[in-house]
Amino acid sequence: MKYRKKPVVIEAIQMTEQIKQHKSEWPEWLHAAWNKDSAEVGAFYCISNVYVISTPEGSMVVSTNDWIIQCIKGELYPCEPDIFERTYEPVVG
């Protein structure tokens, strides 16, 4: 039997060098993650110039140009640009 993934709307921001430097351009949910303790699931933090997200599966590195996705339960994950492009499209309206 085959199954299709239900359409889900997510929020995301691409972590470019410019976005890293201009936190004022971050969405509120990313600011909230930045203010969490690094040991807390859902935290977004930086160690030695490496950006990291604490996910339910463990810590994941966010590379330059990766997308940070906020999923339907509010959890955050990094996503490589090519995978993001194949998986998501902009929502109009």
Image (cartoon, rainbow, N blue to C red):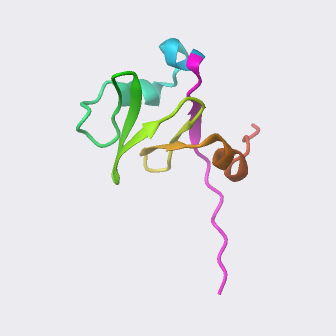
Q: Tell me if residue 46 comes above or below residue 41 in the rendering.
A: above
Residues 44 and 81: in front is: 81
Residue 5 shown in magenta: yes
Name the residue located 26 percent from the left edge and 33 percent from the top edge: 38
Q: Seen in the image, is 32 located left or right of residue 37? A: right
Picture quadrant of residue 54? top left
Which region is colored magenta?
A: 1-17
Name the residue located 58 percent from the left edge and 31 percent from the top edge: 13
Residues 52 and 71: in front is: 52
| Residue 78 percent coordinates (x, y) | 50, 42
Picture quadrant of residue 66? top right
| Residue 65 percent coordinates (x, y) | 60, 31
Name the residue located 59 percent from the left edge and 24 percent from the top edge: 16
- Say how many tags the image has: 0
Q: Seen in the image, is 48 located left or right of residue 87? A: left
Farthest residue in the right direction? 92
Q: Main secondary structure of the magenta part?
A: loop
Residue 2 shown in magenta: yes
Q: Seen in the image, is 10 located left or right of residue 91? A: left
Farthest residue in the front direction? 48
| Residue 29 percent coordinates (x, y) | 45, 30
Name the residue located 65 percent from the left edge and 87 percent from the top edge: 1
The image quadrant where one finds the C terminus is top right
